[in-house]
Image: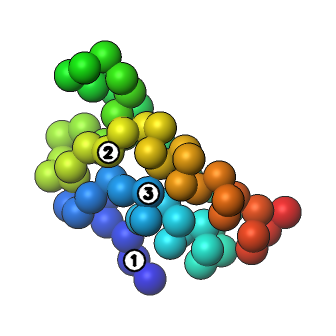
Amino acid sequence: LFYSQITGDSSPEAYNRVLLSGGRAVELDCYDGEDGEPVVYHAFTLVKPCRFEAIIRAIEKNLFKTSP
């Protein structure tokens, strides 16, 4: 599967798909959100931001399912 860093969403589900398909590392590009809370997105792309906390909480349960 191919996951684009140019378009699409920065979403907890996208990071979970990568981890569950055997990905051993993910990169979270973090920036200050408008409300001061960190958000994740790929700068200078069409990717919509997602709250950092939402991604971390969602991927926690899948971090080591396919790889120690």
Residue positioned 38% across, 27% down in the render: 38
Query: Given the current orientation, which residue lies at the most extreme left position?
Result: 46
* Residue 27 visible (yes or no): no
Residue positioned 25% across, 38% down in the render: 43
Q: Amino acid at mark 3?
A: Pro
Identify the image quadrant of the N terminus. bottom left
What secondary structure is found at the residue carrying circle 3? helix
**Mark 3 sits on what residue?**
12
65 vs 22, left or right, is: right
Q: Amino acid at mark 2?
A: Cys
Residue positioned 43% across, 65% down in the render: 13
Estimate the spatial distance between the alpha carbons at disc 1 and disc 2, rounded to whole Å: 20 Å
CB under 8 Å between callouts 2 and 3? yes
Q: Amino acid at mark 1?
A: Phe
Identify the image quadrant of the C terminus. bottom right
Residue 25, image quadrant = bottom right
Q: Which mark is residue 50?
A: 2
**Mark 1 sits on what residue?**
2
Residue 21, image quadrant = bottom right
- Between label 1 and label 2, give the one nearer the viewer: 2
As displayed, is residue 56 above or below residue 31?
Answer: below
Q: Nearer the viewer, residue 41 or 11?
A: 11
Q: Earlier in the sequence, mark 1 or mark 3?
A: 1
What secondary structure is found at the residue carrying circle 2? strand
